[in-house]
């Protein structure tokens, strides 16, 4: 069984254990039965109005369904996973807790104030569209880092399709690459096509870094790659690719790190099982 099938099978079994009705991507009789009929059944808690607005204003189409299920109804939805992990802390106004668990803050830091989803940071007006960053934690004006940004991956890291490289138009930008010579040389390697990486999508991360640097400056943001670990050789390849990219960012003094969802959930479980039991039970039973 490959990694993506393993994730889908595990999530489908979670739905069955909880008596949640599934349907296909094109309705009851078409496609793999991996979409949840009742939207809210795919979430620990219903979308907060402001979180729903974040997704509606983005261009990922996560909530656009029509006659068929929307993307977030998939049991293997990366956006549903990010909502299930992060929205809870936004709702109860304890954002520093999840920021600390993600490796951003020390335990006594209370500078993290808000959580948003699907946020864009334009790189240049030459590009009509900017990539969506899955989760952004906003910090106080006194904080050293203005934002903590998180790129979230679930099953899509193990899909069979090739991911895109970075367009030469990005390489041609001038000042945006200042102080990042190693990242620039790497970008040239994966431009216009990325024939080097299989599971990590580094072009996406490079664009996020460029957008965050353009908005805040190189030393005013931190970026986390939050990924789902799985069984088999694909996971090992993925981890090696993450390590390679991490070394490139370190060479340019870019604040980038990676963490698996499993490591994050285990950390949350150790720290908060007694005080946030329903939330911890849900994410542990579903994603560990």
Image (cartoon, rainbow, N blue to C red):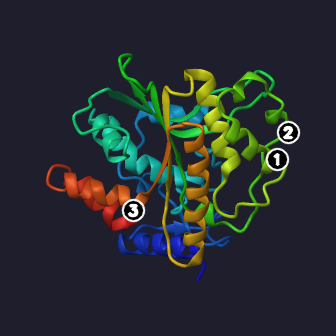
User: In which quadrant of the rendered image does the C terminus lie?
Assistant: bottom left
Which secondary structure, mark 3? helix
**Are there few (<14), some (14-19), or many (20+) residues within 10 Å of tag 2?**
some
From the image, tell me which residue sits under label 3: 262
**Are there few (<14), some (14-19), or many (20+) residues within 10 Å of tag 3?**
some
Residue 206 left/right relative to 250:
right
Front residue of this view, candidates 272 and 217: 217
The tag on residue 191 is: 1
Q: Kindly identify the residue that appears in the image at 65 percent across and 48 percent down.
A: 66
Q: Quadrant of residue 183?
A: top right
Which secondary structure, mark 2? helix
Image location (x, y in percent) of residue 275: 15, 49
Front residue of this view, candidates 192 and 13: 192
The tag on residue 81 is: none
**Is residue 70 visible to us here?**
no
Image location (x, y in percent) of residue 131: 67, 37
Image location (x, y in percent) of residue 165: 78, 50
From the image, tell me which residue sits under label 2: 168
Residue 275 left/right relative to 91:
left
Which secondary structure, mark 1? loop
For the residues bearing labels 1 and 2, Cβ distance under 8 angstroms? yes
């Amino acid at each position: 069984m490959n990694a993506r099938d393993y994730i889908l099978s595990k999530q489908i079994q979670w739905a069955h254990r909880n008596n949640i009705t599934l349907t296909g991507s094109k309705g009851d009789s078409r496609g793999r039965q991996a979409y949840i009929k009742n939207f809210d059944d795919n979430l620990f808690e219903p979308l907060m109005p402001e979180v729903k607005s974040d997704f509606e204003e983005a261009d990922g189409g996560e909530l656009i369904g029509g006659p068929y299920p929307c993307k977030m109804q998939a049991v293997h939805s990366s956006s549903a996973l990010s909502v299930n992990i992060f929205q809870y802390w936004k709702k109860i106004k304890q954002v520093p807790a999840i920021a600390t668990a993600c490796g951003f803050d020390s335990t006594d830091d209370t500078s993290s104030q808000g959580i948003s989803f699907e946020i864009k940071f334009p790189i240049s007006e030459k590009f009509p569209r900017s990539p969506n960053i899955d989760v952004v934690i906003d910090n106080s004006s006194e904080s050293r880092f203005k934002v903590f940004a998180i790129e979230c991956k679930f099953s899509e890291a193990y899909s069979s399709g090739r991911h895109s490289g970075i367009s030469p138009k990005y390489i041609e930008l001038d000042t945006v690459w200042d102080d990042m010579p190693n990242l620039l040389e790497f970008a040239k390697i994966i431009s216009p096509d990325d024939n080097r990486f299989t599971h990590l999508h580094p072009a996406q991360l490079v664009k996020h870094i460029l957008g965050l640097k353009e908005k805040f400056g190189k030393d005013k943001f931190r970026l986390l790659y939050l990924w789902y670990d799985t069984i088999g050789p694909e996971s090992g390849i993925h981890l090696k690719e993450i390590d390679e990219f991490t070394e490139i960012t370190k060479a340019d003094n870019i604040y980038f790190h990676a963490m698996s969802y499993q490591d994050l959930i285990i950390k949350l479980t150790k720290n908060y099982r007694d005080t946030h039991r329903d939330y911890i039970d849900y994410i542990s039973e579903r994603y560990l």
